[in-house]
Image (tube, grey):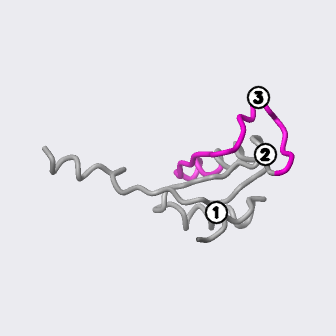
Amino acid sequence: MEEEKDKRPDKDMKLKELGKVWGPAEAEVIKSFLESHGISCIFRGLVVQSIHPFSTNGLGEIKIFVSGNNYAEAKKLLEEISPVEEADED
C-alpha cells in the first residue's frame, strides 16, 4: 500500500511562477488560454479581487503558477500573445 502512494502523479509536482498580471480579467484570459492547451494554472494575489478591485502599488498583482512539468510549454505559448510580466528568477 505504501508503494501505491509513491506512484501518485502529484507527489513530486512543484509549481513554478509563470509570470504576473495586474487584474483578474487578464488572469482569467490567460487561464482560459492555457487550459485550452491542456495546461492547468493557479493564481495568487495580495487581495481578493472581488472585494478590492484595484491595482494600486502592486496590490492588484496576480501571480500565475503552473506545474514545473508544463512551465516551458506554457511560457512558449504565452510569449507571443500575453502581457504577462516575467517572474523573477531565483
Q: Check if mark 3's residue and mark 1's residue have beta carbons within 8 Å.
A: no
Residue 11: x and y in percent read: 33, 52
Image quadrant occupied by the N terminus: top left
Q: Which residue is mark 3?
A: 51
Q: Secondary structure at mark 1?
A: helix
State which quadrant residue 54 falls in: top right
Residue 34: x and y in percent read: 61, 52
Please name the amino acid that badge 2 sits on. Answer: Leu
Residue range (magenta): 33-57
Label 2 neighbour load within 10 Å: few <14, some 14-19, many 20+: some
Q: Secondary structure at mark 3?
A: loop
Q: Secondary structure at mark 2?
A: loop
Label 3 neighbour load within 10 Å: few <14, some 14-19, many 20+: few
Q: CA distance from mark 2 to mark 3?
A: 12 Å
> In the rendered view, would you say 17 is above or below 31?
below
Residue 36: x and y in percent read: 59, 48
Query: Looking at the image, which residue is at 36% across and 50% down?
Result: 10
Query: Looking at the image, which residue is at 62% across and 71% down?
Result: 89
Q: Which residue is mark 1?
A: 77
Please name the amino acid that badge 3 sits on. Answer: Ile
